[in-house]
Image (spheres, rainbow, N blue to C red):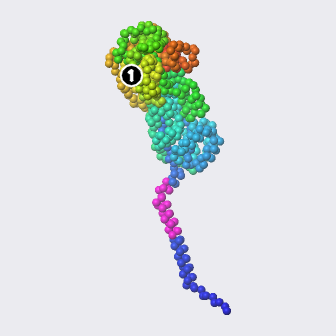
Amino acid sequence: MSLRQPLKNHHQEQRLFLTRVVIVAIGVVLIFAVLGVRMGLLQVVGHSHFATLSQNNRVRLEVLPPPRGLIYDRHGRLLAENRPAYQLEVIPEQVDDMDDTLERLSRIIPLSDVEIRRFRSLLERKRAFQSVPLKLNLDEDALADFAVNRHRFPGVDVHARVARHYPQGAAMAHVVGYVGRINERELAEVDADRYAGTTHIGKTGVERHYESVLHGEPGYQKVEVNAQGRVLRVLERHPPKPGQDLVLGIDARLQRVAQEALSGHTGAVVAMDPHSGEVLAMVSLPGFDPNRFVHGISFSAYDALRNDRRQPLFNRVLSGQYPPGSTLKPLIALAGLEYEVVRASEVMHTHGYYTLPNHSRRYSDWKNHGSVDMDKAITQSSDVYFYDLGHELGIDRLSGFLARFGLGQRTGIDSTGERPGILPSREWKQTTHNQPWYPGETLITAIGQGYMLTTPMQMASVTATLATRGKRVQPRLLRGYADPDGDMARPVHPVPLPRVELDDPANWEPVLEAMEHVVHQRNGTAHGAIGDDLGYRMAGKTGTSQVFSLAEGEEYDAEELAFYLRDHALFIGFAPAQDPRIAVAVVVEHGGSGGAVAAPVARRVMDAYLLEEAS
């Protein structure tokens, strides 16, 4: 029996077909609706955004770093200037593969590991559109090699910048300081927007202290570029604001004289105006050429400087701490008069040594001076006289009086690296060494030895205070701000410090008169070296400070000692004695006699300032 086939349901098939058509139609409508909404968002809502992106394909915003302010000496001589230089820079957002770009670049222009590390550290701190320096101070050969291959390196270009230059070289290294490439730590500390496009920052000295003034404010410009990023034209420009030009109180000619006078020695010379506090000369020898640091000094060259036993990078004027030796004696004499423990005319009989009551230890003198009063004790530098005076004063009155002259404190000079020295006291020793103060230590302090340490800048400041009979001003390098021609436009006024007031102002006179005798009397410790042919009256005090302590009864013999164990030679002085215009402090490391070695240096500086016409 055969099975019957069911008839087709045409109505059901038609309904199924129509349903599918409707679904497809709805899907198509939805797709076109989504496309329409998206097109509307792109063309209407996102118009400004995408128009900007399109514009940025041909218009670029460039930061214009400000020219750094110039630095002049008091007579308008340039101490720091800006010179044209070319450097290789990279815009990160225009480089697809940075590692590959650096590798290919190094085949054309030598890139050291240091340069690449610095570049990568800056790369992390800069924005993608900001130009990052890769290699500074390109020479002509490197410029030519890159120019030929420029098309192979999108985002890499050579830019003409200005580089710092120090015309005076090593003579001003410790005064002006130097600039160097910004490192990662410094970049994190500064205002990123203000330093956009800037590659260098002040590292030491005036360059560092006045960084905020010298730097200036950046500008910017909109430029039209082609597909390779090369600038076609400038569309809009807002120029940077240059840094402020500075005028220092330093006299470059006097600085050279001081450097030549100290030549062959290691040490420091400071000359300042006792009334204004302006530093006229500030020499630390040996020095170094700051220009070597501007474009990045090599590791080997830097290690050679750092490991040099003479320490050329060390600023002895501000960071060197030395026992003041006998240069402290005028202050001890003033303290004796102030506290009325001695009279200037009072005579003491010395025997070449001193002993404390009920003690057997002898504190020796450099010679037996016989009977001495205050004038002779200063003029011939009697240790025994000041041992006794220190004992009578005691360490409490002694340290308190010396603190009034600023010892044991930073002077506050406008530079970097200044140290405070040490002004010993009972409290200081207890805190530092956890030990009591002993009477014998007072005797040693009274002749500027033992724990006592001062910097040459402190010594110059103390000398200025003596010269002005108690007036104190803060030492400073900045004299004022300059106009575009380098002339003084806005002077800086002296910063007064608490005056040293004596109960009897007449007590200044015997001490200052004795300091004149140090130079002008035949038995004065500086007379033999300075001579009788001065064209002015000078007041001064010689000093010799020990590098190590001698045992009781031990004789000092310089010829038997290694050079670095020999005594330092010191001298402080001011002139003219009755109308002071210059105060000088000199330290000659391991120079021996202050009178024979340090005093002639001071004379040459004073002669140049007072007698020779400025050139």
Position of the N terminus, as image quadrant, is bottom right
Residue 152 as seen in the image, left or right of residue 268: right
Residue 614 as seen in the image, left or right of residue 104: left
Taken as a whole, is the magenta stretch helix, strand or loop?
Answer: helix
Q: Nearer the viewer, residue 385 or 61?
A: 385
Q: Which region of the structure is painted magenta?
A: 30-52
In the picture of the structure, the residue carrying the numbered disc 1 is 396
Is residue 33 highlighted in magenta? yes
Q: Residue furthest left?
A: 503
Q: Quadrant of residue 404?
A: top left
Find residue 185 and report its horizontal and vertical position in percent.
Answer: 51, 39
Find residue 435 and report its horizontal and vertical position in percent.
Answer: 45, 25
Find residue 505 and report its horizontal and vertical position in percent.
Answer: 33, 17
Is residue 530 highlighted in magenta? no
Find residue 440 and report its horizontal and vertical position in percent.
Answer: 44, 18
Q: Which structural element holds mark 1?
A: helix
Q: Can you say whether 400 is above or below 118 in the image? A: above
Q: Going 47% across and 46% down the picture, which residue do you hit? A: 236
Q: Quadrant of residue 74?
A: top left
Q: Is residue 144 visible?
A: no
Q: Can you say whether 553 is above or below 171 in the image? A: above
Q: Residue furthest right?
A: 1
Q: Going 46% across and 13% down the picture, which residue do you hit? A: 360
Q: Going 58% across and 15% down the picture, which residue do you hit? A: 560
Q: Residue furthest front?
A: 358
Q: Nearer the viewer, residue 587 or 192?
A: 587
Q: Quadrant of residue 212?
A: top left
Q: Amino acid at mark 1?
A: Asp
Q: Nearer the viewer, residue 28 or 517?
A: 517
Q: Is residue 329 visible?
A: yes
Q: Going 39% across and 29% down the picture, which residue do you hit? A: 492
